[in-house]
Image (spheres, rainbow, N blue to C red):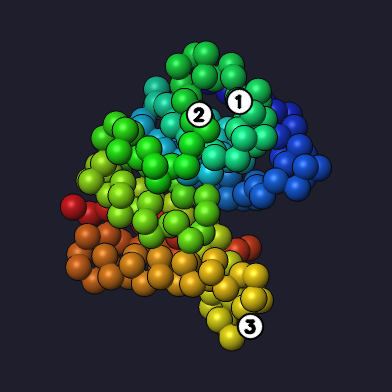
Amino acid sequence: MHIDAAEFQKLKSEAEVLSIPCISPSTGNLLEMVARLGRSKNIVEIGTGNGYSTLHLLSGAALNGGRVTTFEKDVPRFRLALNNLNNYAEKGMLKIFNEDALSVLDEVPANIDLLFIDGMKRQYCDILKKIWNKLEKNAIICSDDIFFQGVLEPEKTLDRHKSIVKGLREYIAYLNELENEGKIKNFFFDYENGISVSQKLE
C-alpha cells in the first residue's frame, strides 16, 4: 500500500494551522523505517493527535500486513483523526480509541512489536510499566520529546514545564535502570526535542 505524499502534507498542515502538537517529517520517516525494518505487525501508539504520526506508522505496518492501535483522549483531536484516517479503519488496519491509554491498556492484546509514546509526558513511565508484559521480545519502544525543554538543564526549566520535565527525567532514569538490568537496549537521539529508541531484550 502506497500513501501519497499529499496525504501526509494535508495532515501536517492541518496540525500546524490548528496548533496541534505534531512530530516532524524526519521523526515520521524514522517511525516508518523502524516499522518496516522491524517487520512490525502489531503497533500501539499513545497520542494520536490529528493522525499525522499514525499515518507514518500505518505506512510502515502496511508493508508487513500489520495494524495500528492508537489512543487519543482529547475529543476534538480524536474526531479529527477519525475523520482523517477512517478509510484505514474501515480496512481493518487501524483502531482509534478516545480514551486515556492508561485506563484501558489492560484491554490491549499482547504481542505488541512496536510502541510509540507521544502523549502526556508525565505518564511515560507509567505507560511503559503497564504495557511491558504485552511487549514481545525484541519489541521496539520509541518515545518522543525525550529531551523536552529543560530535561538536560533542569535549572532552566520554566515553571509551567516543571512537572513535564520531572516526568521525563524519571522516565529516562527508568530506561537506564532497565538497561542496567539487561532488559532493554536504549538509543537516544538529541535532534529537535529528542527521541529514544529502545529494544526489549527479554
Looking at the image, tell me whether mark 3 or mark 2 is earlier in sequence order. 2
Relative to 184, is 86 above or below? Answer: above
Amino acid type indicated by mark 3: Lys
Taking the view exactly as shown, the residue that stands out farthest to the bottom is: 155
**What residue is disc 2 on?**
96
> Do the numbered discs 2 and 1 sit on residues whose CB atoms are within 8 Å?
yes
Looking at the image, tell me whether mark 1 or mark 3 is earlier in sequence order. 1
**What residue is disc 1 on?**
82
Relative to 145, is 56 above or below? Answer: above
**Residue 158 or residue 145, whichever sits in front:** 158
Q: Which residue is drawn at 40% across and 70% down?
A: 170
Question: Which mark identifies residue 105?
Answer: none
Q: Which residue is drawn at 52% across and 13% down?
A: 90
Occupied quadrant, residue 106: top left
Asked if residue 57 shows in the view, the reply is no
Left or right, residue 98 beside residue 67: right
